[in-house]
Each structure stands twice: as structure tokens, then as C-alpha cells.
């Protein structure tokens, strides 16, 4: 415990080299590190962008018979993704279960967010479609929101809409910005019917469009000289407002 306290304090003060010396002294003094010691060292290494050294420490930990805890893996996965070591992050996620730590939704979302942050939403999709089902883990609001936003930002609009619809079908409530981004994406490529469809889905979920969404879609619909879709959308909005007013009275 004394060593752990000192190593944590040194890591927090960005004195990783001193923490490493203290860590190595433990073996010389026949004081065995525990899971917390290794985790603290990994966190310090990742903080200093020495993520591959942290992965090496994980291997040393496993060779000595320790089973890393969930937080240790979260630290490494986040560090690998931030350093754009996506292949290593994916492999680590795949190997967790056989190494004694069952991946949870936090681990999966860490990698999904990391992939999408770097414009690799198709790789993130593999996590949702391949890894998570094999481990009986269901995507949550963060998983779906991240993948939908990642896909539409890359222009993969139909796939983004499919995940949005799947998200809604599972009872999850997308944020306004997720709908808005997809509406804007469809409008930018001239797919106004699809944009209207997303907007209708937004209203059906009980999410009122903000002014930004109207500013994107109304001029495009008016340019098409087809007011029928606009009337349909406005009608849906009026129903939504009436329902909200009625629920507030009740």
C-alpha cells in the first residue's frame, strides 16, 4: 500500500521516471506489486503517451499470473485509440475474455468512440456487429449515437439512417443533434425525401426540431416546388405540440 500511494502520487505529478524506479525497487526488496500497482503504472505511462510501454507492462503482469481488472483495460484501450493504434486496440479487445476479464459496454464504447473520432466508423461498426454480439453485450445510447454520427460525417448516410432506426426501435431516444446531422447530410447531397423521412422520424420520437433543422430543410423543399411534404411535416409538428400541451395539463 505504501508503494502504491507513492507511485500514484509520482504519476499524478508527472514524475513517471521516478515512479518507474520505485516500481523496479519493489522487486529488489521482495515486495510484490499487485493489480493496483500495475494499473497505476499503466495510467502514468498512457498519460505520458508511452502507451506501448503500458501494453508491455500488461504482458509482464499476465506472465506473473495477475489478472488485469476492467479499469486497466479501459486505460489501455483509451490510450491506444488516442495514439491511433487501432489495430492493437482491436486485438486487445478481442483477447480480453480469454485473459480473464470479460469486456463490458465501457470497453466497447471506448474503442467505438476512438475509431469514429478518427473517421473510421466502418471499423467501429465491426465492434457492434461482430464483437459485441459474440459476447452477449448490447449497444447502448452511446454506442448508437457515436456510430450514427460517425457514419453521416463520412457521408455514409443510408447506413447511418439504418442504425438510427435500429436505435429507435430498441427504445433509445436519440439526441436532437443526431437527427439534425443526418437531415443536413441528406440535404447536402440532394436527397430531400430521405431528409424529410428522418425529420418525420424525429417528430414521431417526440423530438421537436430546432430552428437550425428548419433552416436546412425548408428552403430545399420549397426549391422542389412540392409543398405536400412540408404540409405533412408541419401537421406532424402541430400534433406533437398538442400532445405535449395535453400531457402538461394531465
Image (cartoon, rainbow, N blue to C red):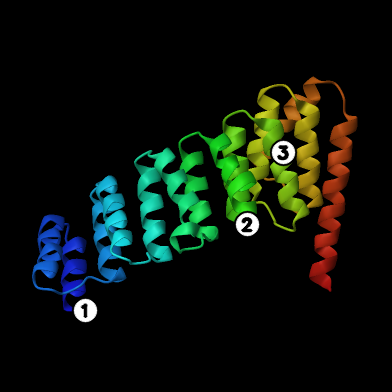
What is the quadrant of residue 154 in the picture? top right
Q: CA distance from mark 1 to mark 2?
A: 37 Å
Q: Secondary structure at mark 3?
A: helix
Of residues 151 and 210, the one nearer the viewer is 151
Q: Which mark is residue 65?
A: none
Q: Earlier in the sequence, mark 1 or mark 2?
A: 1
Q: Secondary structure at mark 2?
A: loop
Please state, as top left, top right, bottom left or bottom right, where the C terminus lies in the image.
bottom right
Closer to viewer: mark 1 or mark 2: 1
Q: Is residue 226 visible?
A: yes
What is the quadrant of residue 226 in the picture? top right
Question: At 20% from the left edge and 61% from the top edge, which residue is drawn?
Answer: 11
Of residues 63 and 231, the one nearer the viewer is 63
Q: Position of residue 114 (x, y in %)?
A: 46, 44
Q: Which residue is mark 2?
A: 140
Structural crowding at the residue carrying mark 2, measured as other residues with C-alpha within 10 Å and reported as few (<14), some (14–19) or many (≥20): some
Q: Position of residue 82 (x, y in %)?
A: 37, 44
Q: Which mark is residue 161?
A: 3
Question: At 69% from the left edge and 56% from the top edge, which residue is drawn?
Answer: 173
Q: Which residue is mark 1?
A: 1
Please say if the residues under marks 3 and 2 sit with CB atoms less than 8 Å apart: no
20 relative position to 56: left or right: left
Q: CA distance from mark 3 to mark 1?
A: 51 Å
Please state, as top left, top right, bottom left or bottom right, where the N terminus lies in the image.
bottom left
Question: At 38% from the left edge and 39% from the top edge, which residue is drawn?
Answer: 85
Q: Earlier in the sequence, mark 3 or mark 2?
A: 2
250 relative position to 164: left or right: right
Q: CA distance from mark 3 to mark 2?
A: 17 Å
Q: Earlier in the sequence, mark 3 or mark 1?
A: 1
Amino acid at each position: 500500500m505504501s508503494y502504491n500511494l507513492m507511485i500514484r502520487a509520482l504519476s499524478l505529478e508527472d514524475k513517471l521516471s521516478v515512479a518507474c524506479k520505485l516500481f523496479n525497487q519493489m522487486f529488489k526488496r521482495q515486495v510484490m506489486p499487485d493489480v493496483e500497482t500495475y494499473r497505476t503504472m499503466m495510467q502514468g505511462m498512457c498519460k505520458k503517451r508511452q502507451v506501448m510501454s503500458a501494453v508491455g507492462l500488461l504482458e509482464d503482469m499476465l506472465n506473473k499470473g495477475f489478472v488485469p481488472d476492467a479499469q486497466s483495460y479501459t486505460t489501455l484501450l483509451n490510450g491506444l485509440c488516442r495514439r491511433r493504434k487501432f489495430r492493437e486496440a482491436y486485438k486487445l479487445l478481442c483477447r480480453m475474455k480469454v485473459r480473464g476479464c470479460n469486456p463490458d459496454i465501457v470497453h466497447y464504447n471506448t474503442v467505438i468512440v476512438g475509431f469514429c473520432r478518427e473517421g473510421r466508423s466502418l471499423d467501429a461498426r465491426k465492434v457492434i456487429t461482430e464483437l459485441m454480439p459474440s459476447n452477449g453485450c448490447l449497444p447502448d445510447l452511446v454506442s448508437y449515437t457515436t456510430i450514427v454520427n460517425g457514419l453521416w460525417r463520412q457521408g455514409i448516410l443510408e447506413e447511418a439512417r439504418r442504425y438510427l432506426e435500429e436505435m429507435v426501435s430498441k427504445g433509445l431516444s436519440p439526441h436532437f443533434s443526431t437527427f439534425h446531422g443526418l437531415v443536413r447530410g441528406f440535404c447536402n447531397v440532394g436527397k430531400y425525401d430521405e431528409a424529410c423521412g428522418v425529420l418525420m422520424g424525429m417528430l414521431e420520437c417526440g423530438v421537436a426540431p430546432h430552428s437550425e433543422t428548419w433552416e436546412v430543410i425548408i428552403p430545399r423543399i420549397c426549391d422542389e416546388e412540392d409543398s405536400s411534404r412540408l404540409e405533412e411535416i408541419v401537421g406532424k409538428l402541430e400534433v406533437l405540440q398538442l400532445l405535449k400541451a395535453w400531457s402538461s395539463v394531465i
